[in-house]
Image: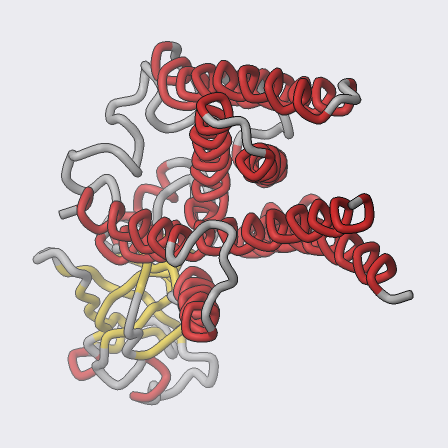
Amino acid sequence: MMTFFEQNALYVVLLITLTVWVGIAFYLQALDKKVSALEKKITP
Amino acid sequence: MKALLLSAGFIIGIAWGIFPGISKPKSTFAKLFALVVMTITIILSLLPQTAGSPEDAVLVSRMGATKFIPVLCTIDISHAMRTDAPGEWIIPLHGSSMKSFLIRYTSPTMDDIDNNTFGDNNEVIALLKRGSNDGEFFINGIVEINPILTLPYIVGLEERARILYFHVPMSWIAFLAYIIAMIYSVKYLRNPDQYYDSIASSAASLGTVFCVLATITGAIWAKFNWGSFWNWDPREISIFVLLLIYSAYFVLRSAIENEETRARLSSVYAILGAVAAVFFIYVAPRIYGGLHPGSADDSSSGPVLSQQDGTLNVLKQIILSLSFASFTIIFFWLLNLSVRIKFAKKALFYSNNS
């Protein structure tokens, strides 16, 4: 696994971009939860 | 030129964020623009091949590596010559410099070589390895013929040089977010309106998200370039302290029940935190020597800020600028959503209680 990443440096970059998107996705998920909670309050 | 290109990225991103207003809904055009900029950034940051010069291949082999590296060159197949060895050819090779080199190539069929195998006298990216001397190479195939865009090969970094487009914008946005939190904290202290406090706290939380992302992306990269996930480099220490400072901000916020006291105290804290952020991001890592580019023992002030020639290729400047723009837009978009949700929640709360 480690040797694979050492030999294919481009996949290290892929891992890094994925980390960034996962981080942003988590924040979006948190926002989504807040909106859902609001929607629950609005609809009787 | 470089400063102009990079600040263009910041300005596009910030302009997207503050028009028509940090917490106003964005127009369809603005959203479409954001998606286009993000798509172009992703394509440009990952698509161009890395390609060095024959001199880079020599340098890599002098450092003891035995691998083939991508080299941008023209293989002059029309002047190829047979040698005494069966199936072996000597082919002239031209890089970007005036020097000419040779390729020693053994045809697998022990026969003539096909013109198309080496790009038919077009510019190609070939995988080369230094042979018995500095002017002679072995070839292990062609990666691309007539490449439109290429990124420079940096010995020791290779493809990992692309972290520049993801890791650097993360810390820039963390800084931007903390400054926005400070601006709205000052506004709150001048005019105690919960509206300002919502923006300040959303900006601080997003800043922390991006700060964590900068740390994780840096750690993954450091494992493969510096050998370990965490090296206690001055910049690593400073971002760690910054994370501690801003986690205390959220601890402070959640510890106070009363809305006004919470907003007032956390505003003061956010202003102090932003002052510390300037010091920890821009000053401290430049005072001490360390692994990050731009440390005190580095020959330049780092690829992003240095005004020396050749520290950052023009294509890389453009991609970095686009990357700054697109991540700034993502940040402002998330901030916009988060603030609007907070307002809606407050409005609902007051309408229920009135």
Nearest the eye: B195 or B121: B195
The image shows residue B73 at horizontal and vertical percentages of 24, 66
Q: Nearer the viewer, residue B74 or B289?
A: B289
Q: In the image shown, does B29 or B188 lie closer to the viewer?
A: B188
Q: Position of residue B351 (x, y in %)?
A: 75, 50
Q: Is residue B146 visible?
A: yes
Occupied quadrant, residue B71: bottom left
Q: Which residue shows up at 75% across the image and 22% down it?
A: B258
Q: Quadrant of residue B75?
A: bottom left
Q: Is residue B140 visible?
A: no
Q: Residue at x 22, y 54 (%)?
A: B314
Quadrant (top left/top right/bottom left/bottom right) for the C terminus of chain B: top right
Q: Residue furthest left?
A: B98
Seen from this angle, which residue lies furthest right?
Answer: A44
Q: Name the residue: 44% across, 50% down.
A: B328
Residue lying at the far front of the rendered structure: B354
Closest to the observer, B161 or A41 = A41
Give the residue furthest to the top. Answer: B288
Q: Is residue A1 left or right of residue A10?
A: right
- How many numbered discs, if any? 0
